[in-house]
Amino acid sequence: MATATETIGLGRTSSPTPVAAPLTVTEKAAAEVKRHIADVAAGGASEAESKLYLRVRVQGGGCSGFQNKLDLDPKYDEKTDHKFEFHGIEVVVDKRSMLYLDGAVVDFHDDLNKRGFTVNNPSAKSTCGCGSSYSM
């Protein structure tokens, strides 16, 4: 089962504070992320030397106001990011994006009509016609 909490405050004398994960990554999505990480490592890219995280973020843009972005990122900053683990992959979310991702589900589809990652965000009030951006 995926770990849905993270511990912040490591290295301090006070007890760690658990933070609930704002999102979920499906097993299928995690498997595809692992495949992409393995491809990067096999390709000999410079990121292959360091650990890669799945970064999930929300940024302004698109015709409805907000867009979800997924990237492989070698950077994790304890001060600005939260780190979670789902099905063997580590997911990094910046603190600002955490505000917008409550209940979101990252999934991967490999069908005839649809291939790729999706982020289903139940907090979205409306989406644009193409489905790449949303309003809250």
Image (cartoon, rainbow, N blue to C red):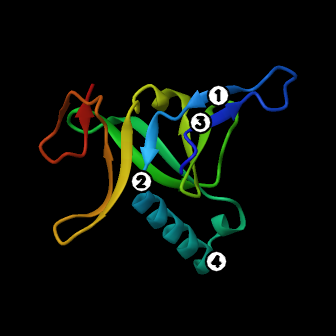
- The residue labelled by disc 4 is 44
Ranked by sequence position, the earlier of labels 1 and 3 is 3
Q: Which residue was labeled with disc 1?
A: 18
The residues tagged by marks 3 and 4 sit, at their Cα atoms, a distance apart of: 32 Å
Q: Which is more foreground, mark 4 or mark 1?
A: 1
Looking at numbered disc 4 in the image, what kind of residue is underneath it? Gly
Q: CA distance from mark 2 to mark 4?
A: 28 Å
Q: Is residue 32 above or below residue 6?
A: below
Q: Position of residue 116 (x, y in %)?
A: 31, 62
Q: Is residue 110 above or below residue 77?
A: below
Please rate how many residues cluster around mark 3, counting C-alpha atoms within 10 Å: few if below 14, some from 14 to 19, many from 20.
some
Q: Distance from label 4 to label 1 (Cα)?
A: 36 Å
Q: CA distance from mark 3 to mark 2?
A: 15 Å
For the point 40% across and 46% down, which residue is it?
A: 69
Camera-side mark, 3 or 4: 3
Outermost residue toward the right in this view: 13
Q: Which residue is mark 3?
A: 5
At mark 2, the secondary structure is: loop
Residue 14 image-quadrant placement = top right
Q: How far is mark 2 from mark 1, CA to CA?
A: 21 Å
Q: SS of the residue at dot 3? A: strand
Q: Which residue is mark 2?
A: 26
